[in-house]
Image: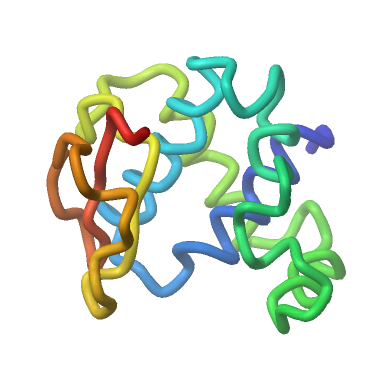
Amino acid sequence: MDWNLGTAARTLWQEARGEPLDGQKAVAHVLVNRLKTGRWGKSLAEVCLWYLQFSGWRDVDPNFGISCRMPDDSTALVQLAGLIEAAQAEPDPTDGATHYYANTIKPPAWTLGATFCGKFGNQLFYKNVR
């Protein structure tokens, strides 16, 4: 698995491993949608690591060490990498979402004025975030 796909699969593991399949797919689409905009980087790895916006890449997060030690050929990472690859080729059920948050928390300020794209798993998805 190359660096970009491996980083994206680890990000997906950190962010959505407890989600049902539709939630995992939706988060994969967010990663791909962010890549398409160019705002967060020019590769999947750059998108995932940009300013450590995904908390799993912060060294104080318990998921950081676990995900970094996972071998590329682990069943979980291979399956999640497949979701990333599929998100690059299939229609986007999130309609271009670039942001999401867990429906168990108070809506973040960035949701104001953003376009709601739907609920997938336990996450709410948005685009046109300022």
Which of these two is toward me, 32 or 100?
A: 100
Residue 127 lies in quadrant: top left
Across and down, in percent, residue 124 comes to 22, 56
82 vs 51, left or right, is: left
Across and down, in percent, residue 125 comes to 25, 47
Residue 122 lies in quadrant: bottom left
- Up-down relation of residue 109 to residue 84 (above or below): below
For the N terminus, the quadrant is top right
Q: Residue at x 74, y 33 (%)?
A: 46
79 vs 27, left or right, is: right
Q: Residue at x 65, y 34 (%)?
A: 47
42 vs 115, left or right, is: right
Q: Tag count in the figure?
A: 0
- Up-down relation of residue 99 to residue 127 (above or below): below
Which of these two is toward me, 81 or 112?
A: 112
Across and down, in percent, residue 20 comes to 29, 65
Q: Residue at x 31, y 57 (%)?
A: 109
Across and down, in percent, residue 42 comes to 70, 17
For the C terminus, the quadrant is top left
Which of these two is toward me, 7 or 51?
A: 51
- Up-down relation of residue 77 to residue 112 (above or below): below
Q: Residue at x 59, y 66 (%)?
A: 14
Residue 30 lies in quadrant: top left
78 vs 34, left or right, is: right
